[in-house]
Image (spheres, rainbow, N blue to C red):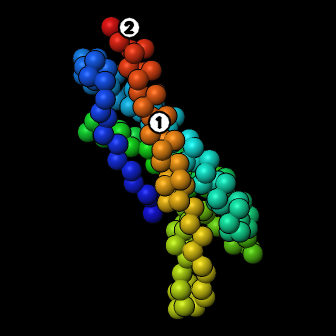
Amino acid sequence: MAAVATVTVKGDDKLIKKFDKLKIATQNRIARRASKTAMIPVKNKQKTLLKSNGSQETGALVRSIGQKTVTQKNVTMTFVGPRVGDQYASVWQGRIRKPHKYAHLVEFGYGPGGFRKRTMPAKPFAKPSLLNQQDIVVGILGRELGRLIEEQATKV
């Protein structure tokens, strides 16, 4: 259900050379910090869209929206969406509901003959939040990368 955006860093050759001189672990740490900071507007937009699109019944899905940043094989990824865990569960109509189990139904909806023979229109929140905030995210990412690289380069 995740919307994906790929960013390739281009620009100031001096800054890129400074980044390349840093240790791999330091490069990964910088990328994680910058990515985590840059995705905050997407997380906030998801929460805003969920509150405004009429899909909020218990508020559990809104409360579960968070982000996780990981690095695998020198590739940093930040995931924004419903977090997994019993602390985000809620009781609705006598049943325990876990937001990560039904978030896709809110995002994409379902048609006739679908879930319990009912229909529900799509109320997208994940993809629009990324698309609406894309320019902001790229700007924040660029500023954060530049700031963190310069900060580390002065330490070396």
| Mark 2, secondary structure of its residue | helix
Q: Residues within 10 Å of mark 2 (few under 14, many from 20)?
A: few
| Mark 1, secondary structure of its residue | helix
Spot the residue most to the top. Answer: 155
26 and 15: which is toward the camera: 15
Question: In the rendered image of this protein, does residue 61 appear above or below residue 39?
Answer: below
Q: Residues within 10 Å of mark 1 (few under 14, many from 20)?
A: few
Decide if residue 124 is in sight here.
Answer: yes
Foreground tag (2 vs 1):
1
Q: Earlier in the sequence, mark 2 or mark 1?
A: 1
| Residue 41, quarter of picture | top right
Where residue 39 appears, as percent x and y from the top left, is 51, 42
Left of 153 or right of it: where is 69?
right
Q: Quadrant of the C terminus?
A: top left
92 and 68: which is toward the camera: 68
123 and 32: which is toward the camera: 123
Question: In the rendered image of this protein, does residue 20 appear above or below residue 56?
Answer: above
Mark seen at residue 23: none
Give the residue drawn at x 47%, y 48%: 134
Q: Which residue is mark 2?
A: 155
8 and 120: which is toward the camera: 8
Q: Which residue is mark 1?
A: 139
| Residue 153, quarter of picture | top left
Type of amino acid under label 1:
Gly
Where residue 86 appears, as percent x and y from the top left, is 61, 56
Where residue 14 appears, as percent x and y from the top left, is 28, 18
Give the residue drawn at x 60%, y 79%: 121
